[in-house]
Amino acid sequence: MLAPVINRLSALLPAQRLLTRPEQLSAYESDGLTAFRARPLAVVIPETAEEVIRLVRFCHQEKLPFVARGSGTSLSGGSLPVTDGIVIGMNRLNRILRLDPALRIAVVEPGVVNTQVSVAAPDPSSQSICTIGGNVAFNAGGAHCLKYGMTSNHVLGIKAVLATGEVVEWGGPSREQAGPDWCGLFTGNEGLFGIALEITLQLLRPPECYHTVLAGYRTLEQAGDAVSAVIASGLLPGAIEIMDALALEAAKAAVHAEYPAGCEAILIVELEGPREVVADDRVRLDSILAASGPVETRPARNSEERMAIWKGRKCAFSAVGRLSPDFLVQDGVVPRQRLGEALRRINAMAREMNVRCANVFHAGDGNLHPLILFDGREPGALQRGEALAGRILQMCIEMGGSITGEHGVGIEKRDYLGKMFNTEEMECLKRIRAAFDPFGIANPGKMFPSEGAPALQQSGLHPLEKAGVLSRE
Amino acid sequence: MNSDLAPTTLSELAEAVRSSPHLIAVGARTKPGLSEVDWPRLVTTGLKGIVEYNPSEFTFTALAGTPVKEIAAALDEQGQYLPFDPMLVDAGATLGGTVAAGLNGPGRFRFGGIRDFILGVRFVDGRGQLLRMGGKVVKNAAGFDLPKFFVGSMGRFGVMGELTFKVFPKRTTSLTLKLAATDIEMATRILTEAAHTRWELDALDLLPAGDVCARLAGPEPTLGPLAAEILARFPGEILSTEQATSLWAELREFGWAHPNGPLLKLPLTPTELPGLHKALRATSESRWHVSVGGNVAYISVPDGTELSGFEQTLTSLKLVAVSVRGNGALWRGIRRDTEIASAIKAALDPEHRFPAI
């Protein structure tokens, strides 16, 4: 039997685009943070911006919670449904409305997949499926953020329907603006302000030339020191990444990547630019790396070798899935000069707590990605994994960093936001949220710790306790 | 008699805000058009100094009243810089004023503007509370991005006390080229085409005199070959180091503008340049400098110039300009009011301690 509100909702869309049967809803119960599940009242599949506006206005009028969802790749549980609300599936709003090479901009609908406009940065690991709308909602990052910034740095304009039903248009095709930066405020709102309907992105011309080097090191510290040396040299690489031994093992198993033997860590550094500039910078980089005591350095000799290096790196998350039935991914940030210390502490904590933890990180900007492995069927394993995750977040805060560099707070880290910001600051954030969404109907339960979380209360058990029974396929 | 509020510490700043039911924050007053209200002033220039600078982190934190010149000098010692080329540096612009005004220089073309380098802010809201938003590390997605919202907010939502920025290593050598443009159509074409090349220009501007100006920054041996390729496509000349330095300084300090009278910042795209140019030719003694590859025009007219015709052009092009200097309206062109703007104002400044924007 459908809730009365869903009966009223059914007037807004053709029946085939209103999903209410359990077998239809099950695909939407979870996102990239698979440890959490919740079944919404219904899923609606709008096809136009007008339909989204009508749906949001309906939700506002009915005080019906809604969660906008793209491809559901959030690693922080950002698109986890709420049990007393609906999911608005945005994938069919997937038109590129304008592509203007002369102005170097694209105007896209939120359901467009990241790689469809791949000359726009950034490049999250899920870029082949994640949507621009999700990138905007969570200010997604990737491996090239130090030089090019996160999603927000590429958003020039936004048309959105706010949780109040108001439709706004901010910014536009110009790279400059006058007045407060509304697009900047909206990007990274985690779905708490409303739903983006059209996004104007700046396009970047792909660099003429790359120089990508993979270097293997006996110890993580050596790899970390090499990063410091590169940074101190005045070079500005497009990407600086590190993978540790366990992550390498996973990548080897998953994509048959091959790495220098006997290495506790590998470093990936990528230079880019006009060929003359890369040729000159390369000489400096090569001498810095040679002096950093690598076991071996392997420059990519062609674009195939470059792609192979990145494939090994970008598959790391899913590859770790082969080593362990379950895992948690974190994305805390520490000051770059404390990376080595952070890794030592993470490894020590993991050993102490008897949890396996693989590390992949954006070393250039201090963005850690500990992948905490556990088998949910083993009693207590999940709790240990979660406890380690909590200690890592606490460490990031103590070091003056952040609990999240790019995945967002979502549901996963909402208990920690209040450790980064004091009570008055949290109140200020909540007032801003309330200005956009006075009823608290847009993606409730995310970002803020004190709010009711229907998904978590539903089972009576801690939801993570259920994670072990789930299959990742 | 000077009755301005002049705090020198962050706690004094919060106290000063609480002490006055109405106030407008100002820095060195290099962009006076943005604070042309007859309200008590809170002068931030006493909030001075670099609080923290970690070259290896690519970050610094400084009090809002710190002159940008002082910051630029400290960064330069470590081979680093703010890549958006802050404006009015010699005039004494403060870091807080730079953010509040949202004025980017020509360097914005390559790596982005203030919004792309601001990381964190400590500010006093309309309730008089000192709050911190954003963070101190180069990457951070926790909480709403209020630091970005403060860019261009003109002190209407809070008074900034301290700011954290990302910086980049600076290329030690650069080369400036002047590319000849016989008319606005040709200049627009050069701006559009040069932005599309493999050269990765560091700046690309249209000069008040009508020529296009391009800057390369990179290793010394690469500059000559790239410059030769540019000049083979767009005829022009390489400027000497002295000529280049003085040209960029003139643009940075608005040396080309009328000393008095309105100075407008107008975000646009290269597409609008020809139409706007026509409207400006009909406005007597108007001058302009187009920056960031044709994405912003700075327009200067003498005091007392009739701007209604020009404003009609803005309206027809759906453009909005803001008055950086000069008496008269803060905004030119038609701005749409939104409910959310009032709601955010109420969230940050419920008693309207700061003027409306």
Image (cartoon, rainbow, N blue to C red):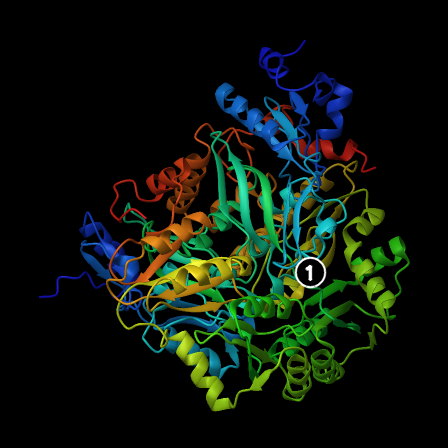
Label 1: how many Cα within 10 Å (few below 14, some 14–19, many 20+): many
> Which chain contains the residue that carries disc 1?
A
> Looking at the rendering, in which quadrant would you find the N terminus of chain A?
top right
Residue A284: x and y, percent? 70, 84
Above or below, A378 against A342 in this view is: above
Q: Residue furthest right?
A: A256
B6 and A168: which is toward the camera: A168
A65 and A104: which is toward the camera: A104
What is the secondary structure assignment of the residue under circle 1? loop
Say whether residue A179 is visible: no
Residue pointed to by mark 1: A143
Above or below, B356 against B190 in this view is: above
Which residue lies at the image location 34% right of the left edge and 56% below the top edge?
Answer: B154
Above or below, B276 against A32 in this view is: below
Q: Residue furthest top?
A: A1
> Looking at the rendering, in which quadrant would you find the C terminus of chain A?
top right
Residue B114: x and y, percent? 47, 63
Which residue lies at the image location 64% right of the left edge and 82% below the top edge?
Answer: B231
Which residue lies at the image location 83% right of the left edge and 72% below the top edge?
Answer: A300
Residue B292: x and y, percent? 52, 66
| Left or right: A59, with B151 as reference point | right
Quadrant position of residue A460: top right
| Left or right: B162, with A325 as reference point | left
Q: Amino acid at mark 1?
A: Ala
Quadrant position of residue A262: bottom right
Say whether residue A56 is visible: yes
A171 and A115: which is toward the camera: A171
Which residue lies at the image location 31% right of the left edge and 65% below the top edge?
Answer: B31
